Amino acid sequence: MAPPRLIFVTGKGGTGKSTVAAATALTLARHRPVLLVDLEQSQSAARLLGLIREGDGPSSPGPALSNDLATLTLSPRAELEAFITRTVPISAISRRMLKSRTFGYVTAALPGLEAFLTLERLRLLAGQAALEDRYVVVDAPATGHALELLAVARSLIQLAPTGTLNRLALAVDQFLRDSARFGVFLTLTPAELALREMLAAVSTMRSEGGIAAITGVINCVPAALFSAADMMKVEALPEHAGLARRRRGLAHGAARARRELGRAGLPITELPLIFAEELTRAALDRLSCTIGPALGLV
Amino acid sequence: MKKVFALDHHRLLLCLGPGGVGKTTISAALGLRAALEGRTTSLMTVDPAPRLLDALGLDLTSPSLQSIDLHGFGARRGGRLQAMRLDPRAIFDRLIDRYAPSPAARSAILTDRIYRSLSGSLSGVADYMAMEQLLELTGAPRPASSASDAAAGSSAELPGPVPAEVVVIDTPPACQALDFLDAPRRMLELLGSRAISLLAPRSRSSQSSGSSRSQSRAFSVIDLAARIVLGAFDRITGLNLLADVQSFVRNFDGMYAGFAERAAASQALIRADSSAIVLVTVAEPEPIAHTREFIASLAALDLRPAAIVVNRITAPLPQESALDSAGLPPALLRKLKRNLADFAVLKRRETAALDTLRTSLPEPTPILFAPDLGYEPRTLADLATIARHLHPAEGGIIIARR
């Protein structure tokens, strides 16, 4: 089974969304060209890949590292402007709309509109990627906001019962439910809150009409190293025992996440905790190899 | 003389920071510390995930402040902790109850399509409502209430039976935090915008605030432009916004003054000397980079953090030499040494990230450390441990001692 054209990476804050997005982009880029899209304007994933330098602002162009990997930052405001310019045939009117403060207020007061147009842009990017046999990886917002984003097409269908937006909203809704075009990676760390937030996200996505989660990515999993018998023996050295317990705690958290994700019927991908002062490109490459199987790639 | 970092003259601590750094934990620890030091403290979260109250073992469905039992934690006299989760829609509805000029206006706005969509969305309005709740908790003077207060009955009262001496608020992650701080200004701008007032039919302008009365003189030109623009947008999109906005504005008429007053009060509250912005972060490259960007954005709003709390600081590592003399089996000894070396790498990474933070601060800002417990804080006792161990790089700390 081929990977979906667009992979949407989300998870609780601090669980490594950008790292996973960067590694996923590397995995796919070994097979086909990849566009790495940033919805947060932090460009974290691009930074990790060395595609931009420290200190480059969000407005800097996203240069391609090679022909196989390029980056793009989406801004909701720019998407709204592009949409107006595209759909309003008379440029005098579209300019006036964009300059109108009232229009600004009204569109800002409809919080779903800009978010929706961002989704519409993702749909177009996925369509283009399918034509050119490329892939798109999206470094998305944290779970709560990502779920709101994914739900926005449905509420817009209600809000605009006819017209352009209604047509687009139906198309976006279909896109999100098409596993050949759209798939979600959910990241978590071996921590209880991250696990709970993720399980809630899985059930929301399912109940809202079948948005496919491809895999749960358990990030930062260390080798357990210490057995229960080992722990008894180190008790005399409380500080070392503390460090050993911390390691075991993470390993046990990961084991628990595996069980719970398995119970929820979600395929699991595990990424090792990397004990390094910097997450180097070599380390990212190593992580990217672990992600391949989840996408049906070796 | 020992240096002391003091937050004791602050009544409001706004905790901001990137996602996943333990903002909720630190907010709770700060609130708990203030309570243990003898203050009446209120703690609230606007996080959509109800983690804080969960950790404190409170009823998540209750919309009001709940007392937390501090028995056995050695709180000083007068120390008290209350916590709540914010429900933006419920607070917005209560505000409507308060400011609606008549019961008919009240039910019209509560069923308005745009109002429902506004109040149900988490961005923007939730932030504004958090501010509204803060005003309530910090005991800012209430504007003269309208006739509907009586009509709405006691259920319309905002919660907060005990006025708090210290209020700690846990905000959404930093990417929305600027929106949070800016929410009152934007709300004020929206409400005060002449264009938006002019969208309303004129019939009720006699009941509305002084500002919209004076605006009605300039009615024709701007109104026409706004109508043309929205009309064109409606035809293209099928949204029917013009009619909706008109009915929304008409329904809101008469409530502007009250809302604008509250928004202005919120804005003043954030900038008051008794309010402190506390940035929460962890000593890792990515969150530290976000924190630096965030300090710069705050400076652009002429705001600066009173303190930075670095969460999950690893305790000093033990000596390797202790292992060799402990008479452990060789295999276990190897594993312990490997584990120590692994954590030493993480500790170096942490130190490097802290150095980056220190050297990049535009002005001297106190940095406080919160310990890593080695597990996720789950109970009040865990939070108390963190609260007790909060410490600055040097010297002492007072959160709320009288």
Image (cartoon, helix red, strand yellow):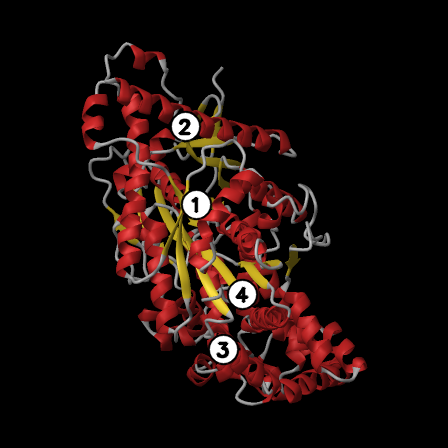
User: Which quadrant is home to the C terminus of chain B?
Assistant: top left
- Which amino acid is tagged 2? Phe
- The answer to whether one can see residue B121 in this image is no
Q: Judge if badges 1 and 3 mark residues of a common chain.
A: no
Q: State the SS at label 4.
A: strand
The span from disc 4 to disc 1 (Cα, nearest Å) is 32 Å
Q: Disc 3 sits on a residue from what chain?
A: A
Q: Which of marks 4 and 3 is in front?
A: 4
Instruction: Identify residue for label 1.
Output: B23
Q: Which of marks 2 and 1 is nearer the N terminus?
A: 1
Height in image: B250 above or below A118? below
- In the depicted view, which residue is nearer to us: A124 or B179? A124
The span from disc 4 to disc 3 (Cα, nearest Å) is 14 Å
Is residue B22 rendered to the left or right of residue B208? left
Quarter of the image for residue B323 reads: top left
Instruction: Identify residue for label 2.
Output: B343
Q: Nearer the viewer, mark 2 or mark 1?
A: 2
| Residue in the picture at 28% in, 33% down | B76
- The answer to whether one can see residue A269 in this image is yes
- Which amino acid is tagged 3? Asp
Instruction: Identify residue for label 4.
Output: A6
Extreme residue in the front direction: A298
- x, y percent for residue B19: 47, 49
- Disc 2 crowd rating (10 Å Cα; few below 14, some 14-19, many 20+) is many
How many numbered circles are shown? 4
- x, y percent for residue A280: 56, 37
